[in-house]
Amino acid sequence: MKNVEIFTDGACSGNPGRGGYGVILRYMGREKEISGGEPNTTNNRMELMAAIVGLGALKEPCSVTLYSDSQYLINGIVKGWAEKWRNNGWVKSDKKPALNSDLWEKLLEQTSVHDVKFVWIKGHNEHPENERCDKMAVAETRK
């Protein structure tokens, strides 16, 4: 399996509001940047979209280390929240509906294709790739 690093970030101008995401894929020293946005969304949806788009850009199953400053994204996977919500019909333990179930479903599908390790990094802490992803995401909110 190819070893790929993916760096992601999401942003929103207003929450909800105009949203954007930025992604960097790195394989064997080569990088690809991807960004996009939506006119009316939330920050959490953009964080999830960044991961979905990054993993979706891979053409074959890969071993991936995905870096994000979103605890919502990281905890949803690492702590198994999204898997539990799906198993409970997208209902949380407090009996409220799980938000963003459409995106969590897509992300869970992709994590079944790839061997993904999710790593939390502190945002706005001079992490070069996170700063680049943030700039791409913010730029998308201004389009």
Image (cartoon, helix red, strand yellow):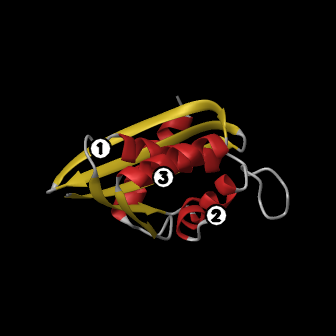
Would residue 132 be visible to someone looking at this image? yes
Location of residue 25 in the rendering, given as x and y in whole percent from the top left corner: 29, 50
What numbered label is drawn on residue 68?
none
The answer to whether the residues at label 3 and label 2 have Cβ atoms under 8 Å apart is no
The answer to whether the residues at label 1 and label 3 have Cβ atoms under 8 Å apart is no
Image position of 66 (left or right of 101): left
| Alpha carbon separation for disc pair 3 and 2 | 20 Å
Q: Nearer the viewer, mark 3 or mark 2?
A: 2
Task: Indicate which disc, 1 or 3, sits on the residue closer to the N terminus.
Answer: 3
Residue located beneath label 3 in the image? 9
The amino acid type found where label 2 is placed reads Trp
Location of residue 48 in the rendering, given as x and y in whole percent from the top left corner: 54, 49
Residue located beneath label 1 in the image? 58
Residue located beneath label 2 in the image? 81
Image position of 7 (left or right of 91): left
Task: Indicate which disc, 1 or 2, sits on the residue closer to the N terminus.
Answer: 1
Which SS class for mark 3?
strand
Residue at the outermost right position: 95
Location of residue 136 in the rendering, given as x and y in whole percent from the top left corner: 43, 43
Task: Indicate which disc, 3 or 2, sits on the residue closer to the N terminus.
Answer: 3
The amino acid type found where label 3 is placed reads Asp
Q: Nearer the viewer, mark 1 or mark 3?
A: 1
Classify 10 Å Cα crowding around label 1: few (below 14), some (14-19), many (20 and above).
Answer: some
Residue at the outermost left position: 28
> Toward which corner of the image does residue 128 lie, by quadrant?
bottom left
